[in-house]
Image (tube, rainbow, N blue to C red):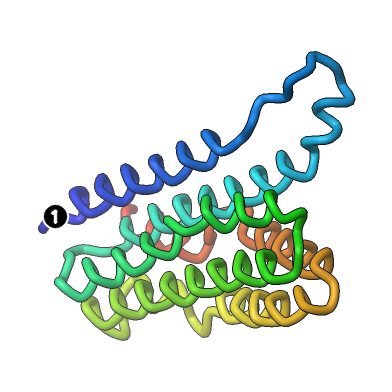
Amino acid sequence: MPKDRLAAFSDGVIAVIITIMVLELKVPHSADWAALRGLLPIILSYVLSFLNVAIYWNNHHHLLHSAERVSGGMLWANMHLLFWLSLVPFTTDWMDENHFDSIPVAVYGFVLLMSGFAYTILQGTIVRVHGPRSLLANALGNDRKGKASLVLYSVAVVCAFVQPWISLALYVSVAALWFIPDRRIEKAIRGRDK
């Protein structure tokens, strides 16, 4: 299978995920600023979830661009990632509906954590297919940023049972860490394309 077909399928699934999230936003029943102010937590959680899905999409694009071929293992690893990302709209809505209570905030973090693990598995699968000296393997190095993200997500899931706002701050921190697409892969791709 050409990698462009895998990228196009993934793009379509991620577009549907984002569409589902926006459809969950409810329009206020009044036309004043107070109505919007009441929705501010819901809007901010939507922004956080949109940002997380967009970050995965950006980095997924770079990841697939580094690949030269697609294997069956890569297809399944990619589906694994898309499965966890597809749960982001559900967990976002659950957090909103329950006013950021501990269990929904923890489950939201668990979904982000599993998305991170799935992304790591996809990276590892691509490296195994292309070899330890491949463009991706060289670009990733020891992947401190990826490992730090998984640790922060794990801590955030536990913190949700102490103070959910600490967890939300950690989720925002991980998103900030990844806001700029992975420059390691970008740099390696530019070097290859020269």
* Rendering quarter of residue 159: bottom right
Residue 188 position (above or below residue 156): above
In x, y percent, where is residue 91?
57, 58
The one nearer the camera, 110 or 120, is: 110
Q: Quadrant of the N terminus?
A: bottom left
Q: Secondary structure at mark 1?
A: loop
Q: Is residue 110 left or right of residue 62?
A: right
The one nearer the camera, 181 or 110, is: 110
Spot the residue most to the right: 34
In x, y percent, where is residue 26?
64, 31
Q: Residue at x 68, y 50 (%)?
A: 97
The one nearer the camera, 61 or 46, is: 46
Q: How many marks?
A: 1
Q: Residue at x 37, y 60 (%)?
A: 82
Q: Residue at x 54, y 60 (%)?
A: 183
In x, y percent, where is residue 104?
66, 65
In x, y percent, where is residue 11?
34, 45
The one nearer the camera, 75 or 99, is: 99
* Residue holding disc 1: 2
Residue 97 position (above or below residue 178): above
**Mark 1, other Cα within 10 Å: few <14 / some 14–19 / many ≥20:** few
| Amino acid on which the number 1 mark rests in the picture | Pro
Spot the residue most to the top: 31
* Rendering quarter of residue 164: bottom right
Residue 29 position (above or below residue 69): above
Q: Is residue 73 left or right of residue 23?
A: left
